[in-house]
Image (cartoon, rainbow, N blue to C red):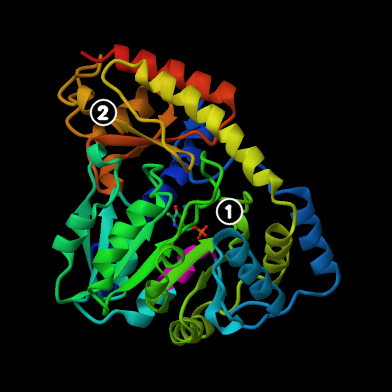
Amino acid sequence: MPALSPRMHGIHASPASILRRRARELLAAGRDIIELSSGNLDFATPDHVIAAAHAAALRGETRYTDVDGTPDMKRAVRAALLRDHRLSYAQDEIIVCNGSTQALFNALQATLALGDEVIIPAPYWAPYLDQVRLSGGTPVTVPCSQNNGFKLRADDLRTAIAARTRWLIINNPVNPSGAVYSAGELSAIAAVLLQHPDIWILADGLYEHMVFGGIPAPTLSAIEPRLRPRTLTISGVAKSYAMMGWRVGYAAGPAALIGAMTRIQSQTTNSASSISQAAAVAALDGPQDLLSERASILRARRDRFAEIVNDCVDLSCEPPEGTFYLLVACAGVISKRSPDGKLIATDRDFAAYLLDHADLVVVAGEDFGLSPYIRVSFANPLPVIEEAGRRLKRTCDALR
Ligand code: PMP
């Protein structure tokens, strides 16, 4: 085969995509798999959103839209930012993308030169790293320990900043820990960033509404307006409105950066789907009660799953304040052996053990830069969580 680009060195398929495929194949092969690894919610996209997509298609909204999004979608994004964060953005400060994944990639492509550094708190959402590498940059991860709630401390940020630092990526709430930065914690981080005017800030708020404290998770440029001219605020409809497969995300930031991102998008994927944008308008403009209703369902599942986990020998977790993930500490299983004599040396071994012996698919800590942990999702109905819990307990008890 002719060679691939040197750019592909060290570039992996995203861990979530590998596990999703594996779970589907095992299910098809007849295994009684429970998928605790997925970023997919079990909730349905709301009916009024689906109806809006259908109506848009029937109206003939089946053509390319403006690259940076339909005027109506950009209006809806501006209104949502104002409603949720009191952030006011102009039409040319917004871009609509094929998922927030693309917004991130456009931004990194538009700004990074070879060898530029991007600070990424760990545990992290894995694609941040490979997106930085694909854009010529170098990811600099900063470990955020459980003692500090898996959150970046201002002092650790200060130490990580170097001459080549171009971006800080800050995700709130955090995938995979479910940690939620408070306004006070973000202010402390902002104070460090104010001393470094050449650093961009990428605030990824994709899970902003999946919080158990009532109000959307705060975002940096709302907390510290002086950072606004160099902050890119990213979000999307994927999680909040259970629209993972519709592929609509967006970013708000300075017009010059948004313009550069739009030029990249015009030459790569063009606009997000016209029909999905019409659906996203209905989601953002429509009734918002479902956000708190769904958050309270998730909260009950979180409480139960955390109870189950903490009941297992050698496992523990803190119930997170947001997202639909539990980060489970599994130091207690390391160095133990499975009933068939296999050594559990790493969290990846533990994840493999759970798959082989309990048909549970979980993500290993190695995949998000912090070990020994596993990430389990509670975006599953309670009876499924109960069954997963029984299997988890049985397989942990069987370790020697
Ligand atoms: N940021 C984080 C932290 C995520 O977990 C995800 C998806 N799981 C994304 C961004 C991208 O989501 P999407 O492209 O569906 O908007």
Name the residue nearer the viewer: 230 or 384. Answer: 230
Q: Which residue is mark 1?
A: 244
Q: Residues within 10 Å of mark 1 (few under 14, many from 20)?
A: some
Ligand 1 within 8 A of label 1's CB? yes
User: Which of the labelled discs sits on residue 330, or is there none?
Assistant: 2
Q: Which residues are magenta?
A: 99-105
Q: Residues within 10 Å of mark 2 (few under 14, many from 20)?
A: many
Q: Main secondary structure of the magenta part?
A: helix
Please tell me which residue is depicted at 58% across the width and 65% down the height of the picture.
Answer: 81
Name the residue nearer the viewer: 31 or 65. Answer: 65
Residue 104 magenta: yes
First in sequence: mark 1 vs mark 2: 1
Name the residue nearer the viewer: 148 or 387. Answer: 148
Q: Amino acid at mark 2?
A: Cys
**Quadrant for the C terminus in the image:** top left
Q: Is residue 353 above or below residue 263?
A: above
